[in-house]
Image: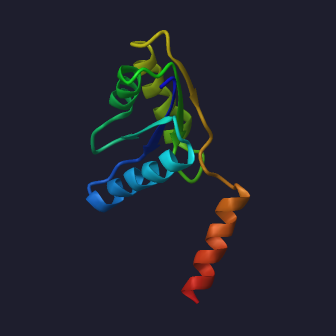
Amino acid sequence: MTRAVLLVDHGSRRPQANEQLEALAERLRARLPGRLVVTAHLEIEPPDIGAGIDACAEAGASEIVVHPYFLGPGRHTAEDIPRQVAEAAARHPKLTIRISEPLGLHESVLDVVVERIEKAG
């Protein structure tokens, strides 16, 4: 595989929260066949971003898109994730690594918020 996606969330002490990222990765694998999809956590639980990038490289990726699975821009998406990606990228100079935007105010996110509000009554 030459193209990979590294999904990154905050990380949690609650296993259910961390398992949700892997469930998202499974669904993404189905939508992006032929692309390697790996998960990592910014803090608290392994694997961290560096380990995720290492795993992509070991699997033969030449290009990685790091997707911060965060709602909005903040310190983690603006500083922490880019810093950790840069540190890992230094170990893999032949890799092309880009970071996508967090979910933000995308229209689809708004649709989900409306749906959840309506379901709550």
Quick check: can you spot residue 14?
no
Residue at the (40%, 21%) spot, across then down: 57
Indicate whether 66 appears above or below 113.
above
Q: Position of residue 33 (x, y in %)?
A: 53, 41
Outermost residue toward the front in this view: 34
Residue 99 x, y percent position in the rendering: 57, 32
Furthest residue in direction top, as rendered: 93
Q: Residue at x 52, y 42 (%)?
A: 68
**Colour approach in the figure:** rainbow
In the rendered view, does 19 fall on the left or right side of 111? left
At a point 59% along the width and 45% down the height, the residue shown is 102
Q: Image quadrant of residue 13?
A: bottom left
The percent position of residue 100, horizontal first and vertical second, equals 61, 37
Please name whichever residue, 97 or 61, is drawn nearer the observer in this view of the structure: 61
Q: Position of residue 47 (x, y in %)?
A: 30, 37
In front of the other: 79 or 39: 39
Q: Quadrant of residue 121?
A: bottom right
Determine whether, in the image, residue 22 is placed left or right of residue 28: left
User: Compared with residue 5, is residue 121 higher up or lower down, i.e. above or below?
Assistant: below
Residue extending furthest bottom? 121
Residue 103 is left or right of residue 22, and the answer is right
Confirm whether residue 28 shows in the render. Answer: yes
- Count of marks, rendered view: 0
Q: Residue at the location (32% across, 53% down)?
A: 12
